[in-house]
Image: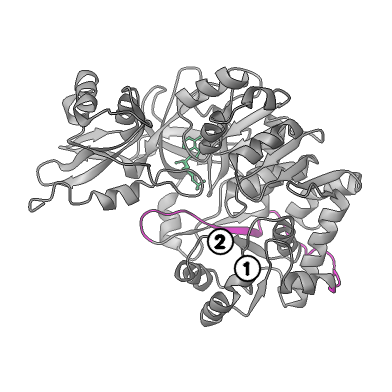
């Protein structure tokens, strides 16, 4: 149907085969759109963007609530030839202004409730036009789409830009990762194959659509395979549980799984499911095991990132190992390398995870130095993650290179310390960070969340770490918190903790 447009041609092929087959269900109202109706809506959005002056090579920024229409707007912008820039609706006006100024989109789509303030900021940042789209699918963009003529999908090739995804960058300015039509298509094809996604699948879709997980991993694979998406506006554990009997497949962040574990009736609700997939943040081995005990299903954990799409996955057929992220996807070359040279290390050693393949992005938007720094001369991308490959090829993520703590000249991997702390009775979870220290450079510092009603204290934690870890890995201080700060994808924000405790060892503190 849209064969000249690399990504859209592939994603809409299932609709050309069977336009009357279901494509997306609005969970809540239960309304189902057929594949034909979904893509017809996207074509109308494309018509509206083209009428607004969007031409191939432009960017379209979208900061909308999650809805069927928001997805149609994203695919419509791609049909019009633009690269999409999805933005978290939780960003403040100031944060949004930075992205608009940096990406210079031709059109910015936002929620009508924020149109006045954001429209003004967009204009100041040089954006030609701000249009609105509300959570219920109404707004100026929808009105324009209703009357728009579709000129046909713009010609786009595999190496044309499809998306500018800003990384959650915890240090310095957020960077726009440039992903091409080919990057996205090849990754979706690999995932459909290895996870055996098929027309009979119904995907419980409760992830946000401003991030690669909900947008490209979930939506692209469902569209490509001709599966049905069951669209939840957001994740709510009770609503997800109620919808499980209608689904066969769920993709989630670890928090989805831990929250569902607290729901009564999980075993029966999950009985008909084919596959549960987790990623975007580490799934603790205990949670993996608790899920298997509660449902009889082993969660399939996979690993990827904004810049590369998905990189590794536990096997669909074969052992899904708790605490590991499995093997490289077809087409992905992956090394655990010496961080200083990029030379591959022997299996079993911890090092820098580096990757190459047709899924890897083509650099950071307007940041040539940052892009150059991120790649080895061999073309391998340095992910910033640290990992280890065990003898039968399963990769484990040991942490982020930038979270590595160097205390008194020794390297401390926070995850190793966290695992010991988490095993102490009464501990719900922990985060270990490095805090500036006058003697050690950085001091290992633990932030611990207690289980409800538990009275575990610092002495109990320090006794356990003293018994099981070398002295330099033992926390120099333990703080308690009600919860760990997490971002929308469930990642612990260690930068926030580092700021909170920055002066814990200051000489004048
Ligand atoms: P993002 O670009 O927001 O998708 O974040 C990517 C980062 O999330 C990766 O570089 C990893 O640090 C982390 N990540 C993703 N999946 C996993 C996983 N299964 N286990 C541990 N960390 C993960």
Residue 435, horizontal then vertical, whole percent: 22, 45
Colouring method of the image: one colour
Tag 2 residue: 89
Q: Residue lying at the far front in this picture: please name it.
A: 453
- Cα–Cα gap, marks 2 and 1: 8 Å
Camera-side residue of 231 and 437? 231
Residue 1 visible (yes or no): no
Task: Please say whether residue 434 is one of the residues in the magenta stretch.
Answer: no
Mark 2 and 1 residues: CB-CB less than 8 Å, in contact? Answer: yes
**Residue sitting at x 69%, y 67%:** 133
Around disc 2, counting alpha carbons within 10 Å, would you say few (fewer than 14), some (14 to 19), or many (20 or more)? some
Q: Could you tell whether 447 is left or right of 44 in the image?
A: left
Tell me the element at label 1: loop
**Residue sitting at x 46%, y 53%:** 168
Quadrant placement of the N terminus: bottom right
Instruction: Give residue 403's quadrant in the image.
Output: top left
Instruction: Give residue 49's quadrant in the image.
Output: bottom right
Tell me the element at label 2: loop
Q: Could you tell whether 82 is left or right of 125 in the image?
A: right
Residue 46, horizontal then vertical, whole percent: 77, 66
The label number, if any, that marks residue 111 in the structure image? 1
Q: Main secondary structure of the magenta part?
A: loop
Q: Could you tell whether 493 is left or right of 78 in the image?
A: left
Nearer-N-terminus badge (2/1)? 2
Which residues fall within the magenta stretch? 147-172
Around disc 1, counting alpha carbons within 10 Å, would you say few (fewer than 14), some (14 to 19), or many (20 or more)? many
Camera-side residue of 115 and 43? 115
């Amino acid at each position: 149907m849209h064969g000249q447009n690399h990504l859209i041609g592939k994603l809409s092929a299932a609709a050309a085969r069977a336009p009357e087959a279901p494509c997306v269900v609005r969970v809540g109202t239960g309304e189902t759109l057929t594949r034909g109706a979904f893509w017809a809506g996207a074509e109308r959005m494309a018509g509206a963007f083209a009428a607004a002056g969007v031409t191939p090579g432009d960017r379209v920024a979208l900061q909308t609530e999650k809805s069927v229409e928001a997805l149609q707007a994203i695919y419509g912008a791609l049909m019009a030839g633009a690269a999409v820039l999805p933005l978290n609706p939780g960003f403040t006006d100031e944060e949004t202004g930075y992205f608009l100024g940096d990406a210079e989109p031709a059109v910015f789509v936002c929620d009508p409730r924020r149109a006045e303030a954001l429209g003004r900021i967009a204009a100041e940042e040089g954006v030609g036009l701000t249009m609105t789209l509300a959570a219920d699918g109404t707004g100026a963009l929808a009105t324009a789409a209703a009357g728009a003529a579709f000129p046909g999908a713009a010609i786009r090739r595999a190496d044309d830009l499809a998306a500018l995804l800003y990384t959650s960058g915890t240090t310095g300015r957020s960077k726009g990762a440039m992903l091409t039509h080919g990057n996205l298509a090849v990754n979706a094809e690999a995932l459909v194959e290895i996870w055996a996604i098929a027309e009979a699948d119904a995907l419980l879709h409760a992830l946000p659509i401003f991030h690669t997980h909900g947008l490209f991993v979930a939506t692209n694979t469902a569209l490509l395979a001709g599966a049905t998406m069951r669209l939840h506006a957001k994740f709510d554990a009770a609503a997800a549980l109620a919808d499980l009997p209608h689904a066969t497949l769920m993709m989630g962040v670890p928090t989805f799984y831990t929250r569902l574990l607290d729901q009564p009736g999980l075993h029966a609700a999950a009985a008909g499911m084919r596959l549960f997939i987790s990623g975007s943040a580490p799934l603790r081995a205990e949670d993996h095991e608790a899920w298997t005990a509660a449902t009889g299903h082993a969660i399939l954990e996979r690993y990827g990132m904004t810049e590369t799409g998905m990189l590794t996955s536990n096997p669909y057929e074969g052992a899904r190992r708790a605490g590991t992220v499995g093997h490289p996807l077809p087409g992905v070359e992956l090394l655990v390398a010496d961080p200083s040279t990029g030379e591959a290390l022997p299996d079993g050693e911890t090092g820098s995870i580096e990757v190459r393949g047709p899924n890897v992005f083509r650099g950071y938007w307007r940041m040539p130095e940052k892009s150059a720094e991120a790649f080895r001369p061999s073309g391998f991308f340095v992910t910033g993650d640290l990992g280890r490959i065990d003898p039968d090829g399963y990769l484990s993520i040991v942490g982020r290179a930038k979270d590595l703590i160097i205390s008194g000249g020794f390297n401390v991997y926070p995850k190793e310390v966290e695992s010991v702390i988490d095993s102490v009775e009464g501990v719900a979870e922990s985060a270990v960070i490095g805090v500036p220290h006058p003697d050690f450079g950085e001091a290992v510092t633990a932030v611990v969340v207690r289980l409800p009603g538990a009275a575990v204290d610092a002495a109990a934690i320090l006794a356990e770490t003293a018994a099981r870890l070398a002295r330099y890995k033992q926390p120099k201080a333990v703080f308690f918190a009600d919860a760990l700060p997490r971002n929308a994808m469930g990642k612990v924000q260690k930068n926030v903790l580092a700021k909170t405790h920055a002066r814990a060892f200051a000489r004048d503190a």
